[in-house]
């Protein structure tokens, strides 16, 4: 069985991408962030990684919640591992708890008797970015919010591409009345105030993750459709398509085997920008209160809190910091992809 | 070519009808309009005044069917959608956008009151963007891959990647709340009417800085990179090379030949600004509490003030459609090679 | 000619050609006026012409002979609550979060918070003493009850005047009925109330009248002592009412009137020169500020900044955040701004969690009790609300004898949850949540106020310990209200507004259960409950009603469909030190110590120019005063002491 291998032009493109350092490192950083967020339970969690109790090991991270009674505590609800760690340390009889780096989950409220949230960043308490106005760890909310935002953008991307690529190809390829009709439709569609539709829907149903993806897709398919249309339109006029048609290839075959592969560059280039616009869209909606319902961790909700409690500067600073890192990384990746796929060598006399 | 533009202008009509019909129909589907608001208020009155002492044997709707019908007639919800759409359209043709169901002011007047504010920011942003981006783009193109190019790229990209309103929130928290350098939003201070003219100008400018920064941040990158890339394309083009080879000084080649051609795409995008200038970003206006068109549109959507929603839609979609044509006209005017058929 | 002549007509204002005749007539009237009456003018002059025309010669309503044997009562013996030290003067600056959508007090969008500022300047026939709750005079000096239980007689104060100088007469009260019943005002609720609850107004002479309710009701005076409506101003209404009167300044009878306003920015009220009631026993030494200015400040946080910069005179510190943290600031610490924590004893809103009994899970009373025991309201009070709120023990606290002091809300208690749930046959699932037959104890909590999210988040976390999962669902206010009224909620997080006497029928009687659009959002359906509620509604005897009321509250507690949460039985305010308050600072029912207009509790404060000058000088010199935080517990609820 032949090993799967990229063909030489693709390999050349990948190598060219790697040579654009800004983009390559952005991809590395962004990839790490995504992986880290997917395994967030291992480093941002209010459940312990490992508990050693009376000679036995427990791994509460991914299991069902363990009641406090498991560890000889006097309650039946889920163990408070931060408290358990303190007790074991105080007792000093060989039991221990290994907490994740950030010992708070996205919903954990860390309230105190003598002070009230929001608490500023505090390394001793391991609130590295402080807490929000309810006493939840900002970093934990950021990480879990990031995970949701990324999955949201990828889901949105998938739906948008499914609609956009097929419709755009069809419009560009068939042209004529079909094209003209959808052109009008798109023009109309892109003028409907989309916030309006979102408010309608969110007042009828509470938007869940997938409902929100679908709502956003109602308006998200336009951009990629338009681009695909233009590209297909150009490709259609090329000689090889004419040749294929002369040879008697069906429309489906021409589109699938000839035109689509030649538009991959466009599709790939478009992707990073779609991801970043997906993140921005979700954040904006959450900021306005029309996004995912509370208490879902979300960047937009944190921004809204930061706007209301301006004195808690660490909330806004953390979110904006995280947004800058994420969005700039994605944008750099996009720029690098574009450059790798469509290199322009400038030769200038001077 | 004239025929082409006439055709384009005629195409505005079906598109405009399509947009307005759609939103009008949606309007009818949205819960929470003025009638529901009145019902809710009536119910609140009912429960706070203790309802009816010993009324009929069961609690009624706060309003009877008949009363609701009368309210529907009052707000024009009593007819089939398309009939009331027709009536609405006929009024719009006569220049009457109707009356707000929330402020009971004419929609047209509400829009006209807000336009100068959005226009103010729109024009300032345009000036800033074109005034800075074109020179910056040229400089970057001439020093491609230099340290200067890389550093400015990073700055420009940060501005591009992060949405303007997020930058606005950050600026507001840091510069207005924590360090108290700039005001906390609004376009004028509270005692604005009592100020002298000079103070008023200073006051407005002082309130303008942060929102303008937020506005500019986003548009910056696109324009700068556009300028840079097209100029570089042109510098690499044969005609410039030929000119330089013939002994024309490089600077002259750039400014006499390459630059002129590079301005074409910039000119193309100019037409689209027509609608941007008046629509404003509702998010930035919301963050900075500026009473522009964007905020008016947002609030009218949230408060289900249908006539205002539709009125803004009429204005903004017309501007958008005309803007598209204008931008083609710009292209035709700037680039003699372009022929629209 | 009297009515028509005082209304100047602006000819430009009429856009309707069909009104030309009317207009000509009015011009004629105008000419007469200019020739005859000279300078007489009303505020609010640009009104629709046809209203004037119809109003001109008011058809006199028939006068009836006064029945024999009426025993007139009045009240000039209850204690006064204003301070004799109070002096006149000063301008009070207050903030509005948004400019009112209209100055109308009826019709679409008139229900804004600003409406009370206008309505408070419309006196009623009689009022309620804020401490003794007895009837006191307002526009009527004397009153009497007819033995039929539905008629009340009133003798008007002969000196009572509208702000445009017209005397207040019995016809103005009869006109209130015409006005409120008119469909032109687009206020169906009022249309209904004034047709179904008030039968008629009987006029005996210009200053003597009777109001007849549709049927005998308890506390008759609370229902029928309405305010007059200036007939000479409105005349006959037409379809233009809503638009034509949107920004009209309607003549009123109270101490202040709007003097000018700038739409979207500010409204200014001025105290009337020689207000007709200023020497009346319960109005003396009150309403002292010369001017009251409401300025729009769109954001609540900004309001505080404005207050600190002396652009506002008072600020409500009810939110714990403001009382504890934000008011630790220079102006307070240097004593320029004083703070007061004033406890009142007034009706508390029934705030809490309302369980929908039609949901299968809540059919079992033990599960409802367990749910109540799983709500850690105390922790929310201590750790989110800084211990400033009080636990609401049941839904009807602060109603005096009508409140049952014995009921205590179910407290957070894991042991009880455990016992109740086990008894009901539930077991803890693998995730720690109670389950039975594949049904998890997970319920949706519908709420609408963003500010309540922190409280609910803590409740949710605590409930999880008790094995109950709360799924928070925030909807915008209209959508949440709709969902709850359609009884599509599991649990609704909300509060009801209060009234002088508790209302049970709409919330707990079975005729309102299991159907949409009624206020029985728990779907309480209990024959015993129906029986006592009916008895309560049909009784006219105050003592018996109070006893029944307490019994109903016990029954509500027993059913356990309502989990009461918080109450705020006090007001906390900050004010610049040149504003003075009486001793005690307010009344039993005071909700705002710096309410400038309220006829029952408002206008007790006054401006002290000497202290103002002293403070200004001190601020200039950088000197401070001893910081003042006054705690006034005169009227603190007995159960909290």
Image (cartoon, coloured by chain):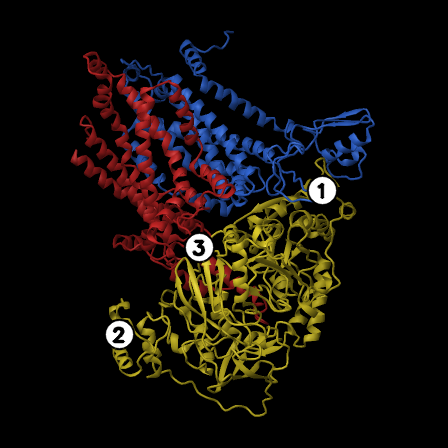
- Drawing shade for chain C: yellow
Question: Which residue: 35% across, 81% down?
Answer: C3
- Drawing shade for chain B: red
Residue C472 drawn at (x, y percent): 60, 45
In this rendering, does residue A256 appear at all? no
- Drawing shade for chain A: blue
Residue linked to disc 3: B33
User: Picture quarter containing residue A17?
Assistant: top left
Callout 2: residue from which chain? Answer: C
Query: C291 left or right of A293?
Result: left
Question: Which residue: 57% across, 55% down?
Answer: C623
Choose between C369 and A26: the one closer to the eye.
Answer: A26
Q: Nearer the viewer, mark 1 or mark 2?
A: 2
Name the mark on residue C467.
1
Q: Are marks 2 and 3 in contact (CB under 8 Å)?
A: no
In this rendering, does residue A293 appear at all? yes
Question: How far is mark 1 from mark 3, CA to CA?
Answer: 40 Å
Query: C75 left or right of A267?
Result: right
First in sequence, mark 1 or 2: give its number: 2
Choose between B37 and A298: the one closer to the eye.
Answer: A298
Query: A292 left or right of C528?
Result: left
Do discs 2 and 3 share a chain?
Answer: no
Callout 3: residue from which chain? Answer: B
Look at the picture and state if C596 lies above or below C471.
below
Residue C403 drawn at (x, y percent): 70, 66
Do discs 1 and 3 share a chain?
Answer: no
Residue linked to disc 2: C23
Residue B63 drawn at (x, y percent): 49, 64
Question: How far is mark 2 from mark 3, CA to CA?
Answer: 37 Å
User: Picture quarter containing residue A102?
Assistant: top right
């Amino acid at each position: 069985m032949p090993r799967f291998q990229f063909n030489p032009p693709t390999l050349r493109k990948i190598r060219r991408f790697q040579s654009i350092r800004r983009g390559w490192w952005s991809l590395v950083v962004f990839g790490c962030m995504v992986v880290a967020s997917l395994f967030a339970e291992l480093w941002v969690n209010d459940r312990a990684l490992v508990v050693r109790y009376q000679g036995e090991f427990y791994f509460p991270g991914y299991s069902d919640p363990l009641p406090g009674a498991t560890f000889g505590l006097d309650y039946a609800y889920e163990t408070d591992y931060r408290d358990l760690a303190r007790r074991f340390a105080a007792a000093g009889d060989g039991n221990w708890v290994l907490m994740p780096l950030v010992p708070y989950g996205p919903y954990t409220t860390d309230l105190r008797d003598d002070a009230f949230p929001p608490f500023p960043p505090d390394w001793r308490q391991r609130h590295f970015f402080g807490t929000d106005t309810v006493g939840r760890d900002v970093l934990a909310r950021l990480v879990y919010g990031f995970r949701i935002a990324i999955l949201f953008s990828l889901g949105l991307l998938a739906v948008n591409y499914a609609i956009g690529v097929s419709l755009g190809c069809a419009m560009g390829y068939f042209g004529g009345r079909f094209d003209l009709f959808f052109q009008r439709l798109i023009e109309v569609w892109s003028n409907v105030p989309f916030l309006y539709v979102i408010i309608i829907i969110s007042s009828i149903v509470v938007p869940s993750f997938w409902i929100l993806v679908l709502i956003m897709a109602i308006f998200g398919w336009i951009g990629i459709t338009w681009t695909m249309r233009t590209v297909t339109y150009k490709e259609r006029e090329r000689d090889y398509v004419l040749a294929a048609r002369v040879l008697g290839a069906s429309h489906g075959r021409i589109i699938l085997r000839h035109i689509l592969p030649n538009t991959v560059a466009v599709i790939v280039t478009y992707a990073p920008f779609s991801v970043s616009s997906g993140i921005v869209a979700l954040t904006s909606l959450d900021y306005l209160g029309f996004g995912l319902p509370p208490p879902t961790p979300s960047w937009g909700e944190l921004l809204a809190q930061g706007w209301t409690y301006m004195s808690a500067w660490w909330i806004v600073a953390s979110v904006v910091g995280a947004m800058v890192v994420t969005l700039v990384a994605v944008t750099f990746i996009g720029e690098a992809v574009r450059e790798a796929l469509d290199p322009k060598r400038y030769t200038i006399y001077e | 070519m004239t025929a082409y533009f006439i055709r384009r202008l005629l195409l505005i009509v079906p598109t405009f009808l399509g947009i307005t019909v759609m939103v009008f129909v949606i309007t009818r589907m949205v819960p929470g309009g003025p009638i529901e608001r009145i019902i809710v208020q009536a119910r609140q009155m009912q429960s706070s005044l203790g309802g009816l002492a010993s009324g009929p044997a069961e609690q009624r709707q706060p309003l009877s069917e008949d009363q609701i019908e009368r309210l529907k007639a009052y707000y024009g919800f009593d007819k089939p959608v398309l009939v009331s759409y027709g009536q609405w359209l006929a009024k719009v043709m006569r220049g009457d956008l109707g009356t707000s169901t929330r402020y009971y002011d004419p929609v047209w007047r509400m829009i006209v009151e807000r336009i100068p504010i959005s226009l103010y920011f729109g024009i300032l942003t345009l000036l800033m963007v074109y005034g800075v981006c074109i020179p910056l783009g040229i400089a970057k193109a001439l020093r491609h891959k230099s340290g200067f190019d890389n550093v400015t790229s990073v700055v420009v990209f940060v501005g591009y990647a992060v949405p303007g309103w997020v930058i606005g929130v950050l600026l507001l928290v840091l510069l207005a709340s924590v360090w108290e350098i700039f005001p906390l939003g609004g376009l004028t201070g509270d005692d604005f009417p009592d100020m002298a003219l000079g103070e008023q100008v200073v006051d407005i400018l002082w309130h303008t800085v942060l929102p303008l920064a937020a506005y500019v941040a986003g548009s910056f990158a696109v324009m700068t990179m556009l300028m840079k890339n097209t100029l570089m394309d042109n510098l690499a083009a044969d005609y410039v090379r030929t000119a330089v080879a013939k002994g024309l000084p490089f600077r002259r080649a750039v400014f006499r030949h390459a630059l002129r051609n590079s301005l074409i795409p910039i000119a193309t995008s100019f037409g689209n600004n027509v609608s941007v200038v008046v629509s404003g970003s509702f998010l930035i206006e919301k963050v900075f509490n500026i009473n522009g068109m964007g905020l008016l549109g947002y609030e009218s959507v949230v408060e289900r003030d249908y006539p205002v929603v539709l009125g803004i839609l009429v204005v903004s979609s017309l501007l958008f459609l005309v803007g598209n044509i204008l931008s083609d006209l710009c292209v035709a005017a700037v680039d003699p090679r372009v022929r629209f058929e | 000619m009297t009515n028509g002549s005082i209304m100047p007509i602006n000819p430009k204002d009429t856009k309707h050609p069909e009104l030309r005749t009317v207009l000509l007539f009015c011009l004629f009237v105008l000419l007469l006026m200019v020739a005859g009456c000279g300078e007489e003018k009303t505020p609010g002059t640009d009104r629709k012409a046809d209203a004037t025309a119809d109003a001109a010669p008011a058809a006199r309503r028939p006068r009836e002979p006064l029945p024999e044997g009426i025993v007139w009562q009045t009240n000039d013996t209850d204690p006064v609550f204003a301070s004799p030290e109070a002096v006149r003067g000063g301008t009070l600056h207050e903030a509005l979060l948004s400019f009112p959508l209209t100055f109308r007090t009826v019709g679409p969008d008139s229900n804004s918070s600003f409406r009370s500022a206008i309505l408070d300047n419309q006196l009623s026939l009689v009022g309620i003493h804020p401490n003794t709750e007895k009837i006191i005079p307002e526009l009527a000096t004397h009153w009497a009850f007819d033995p039929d239980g539905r008629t009340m007689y009133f003798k008007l104060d002969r000196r009572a005047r509208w702000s445009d100088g017209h005397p207040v007469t019995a016809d103005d009260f009869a006109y209130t009925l015409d006005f409120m019943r008119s469909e032109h005002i687009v206020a169906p609720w009022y249309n209904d109330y004034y047709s179904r609850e008030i039968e008629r107004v009987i006029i005996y002479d210009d200053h003597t009248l009777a109001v007849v309710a549709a049927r005998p009701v308890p506390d008759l005076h609370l229902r029928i002592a309405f305010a007059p409506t200036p007939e000479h101003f409105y005349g006959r209404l037409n379809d233009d009412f809503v638009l034509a009167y949107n920004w009209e300044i309607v003549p009123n009878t109270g101490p202040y009137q709007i003097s000018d306003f700038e739409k979207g920015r500010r409204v200014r009220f001025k105290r009337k020169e020689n207000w007709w009631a200023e020497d009346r026993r319960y109005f003396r030494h009150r309403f002292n500020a010369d001017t009251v200015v409401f300025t729009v400040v769109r954001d609540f946080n900004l309001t505080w900044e404005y207050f600190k910069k002396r652009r506002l005179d008072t600020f409500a510190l009810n939110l714990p955040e403001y009382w504890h943290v934000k008011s630790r600031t220079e102006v307070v610490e240097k004593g320029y701004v004083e703070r007061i924590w004033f406890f009142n004893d007034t009706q508390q809103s029934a705030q809490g969690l309302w369980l929908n009994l039609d949901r299968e899970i809540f059919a079992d009373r033990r599960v409802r009790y367990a749910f109540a025991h799983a709500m850690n309201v105390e922790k929310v009070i201590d750790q989110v609300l800084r211990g400033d709120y009080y636990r609401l023990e049941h839904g009807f606290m602060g109603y005096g004898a009508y409140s049952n002091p014995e009921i205590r809300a179910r407290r957070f208690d894991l042991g009880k949850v455990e016992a109740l749930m086990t008894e009901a046959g539930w077991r803890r699932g693998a995730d720690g949540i109670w389950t039975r037959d594949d049904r998890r104890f997970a319920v949706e909590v519908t709420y609408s106020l963003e500010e309540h999210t922190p409280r609910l988040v803590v409740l949710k976390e605590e409930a999880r310990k008790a094995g109950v999962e709360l799924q928070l669902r925030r909807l915008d206010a209209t959508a949440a209200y709709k969902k709850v009224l359609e009884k599509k909620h599991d649990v609704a997080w909300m509060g009801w507004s209060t009234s002088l006497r508790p209302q049970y029928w709409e919330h707990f009687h079975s005729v309102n259960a299991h159907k949409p659009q009624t206020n029985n959002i728990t779907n309480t359906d209990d024959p015993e409950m129906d029986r006592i509620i009916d008895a309560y509604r049909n009784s006219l005897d105050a003592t018996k009603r109070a006893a029944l009321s307490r019994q109903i509250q016990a029954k509500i507690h027993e059913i356990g469909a309502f989990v009461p949460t918080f109450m705020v039985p006090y007001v906390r305010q900050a004010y610049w030190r040149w504003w003075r308050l009486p001793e005690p600072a307010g009344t039993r029912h005071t909700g705002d110590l710096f309410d400038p207009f309220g006829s029952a509790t408002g206008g007790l404060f006054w401006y002290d120019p000497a202290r103002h000058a002293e403070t200004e000088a001190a601020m200039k010199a950088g000197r401070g005063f001893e910081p003042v935080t006054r705690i006034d517990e005169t009227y603190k609820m007995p159960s909290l002491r």
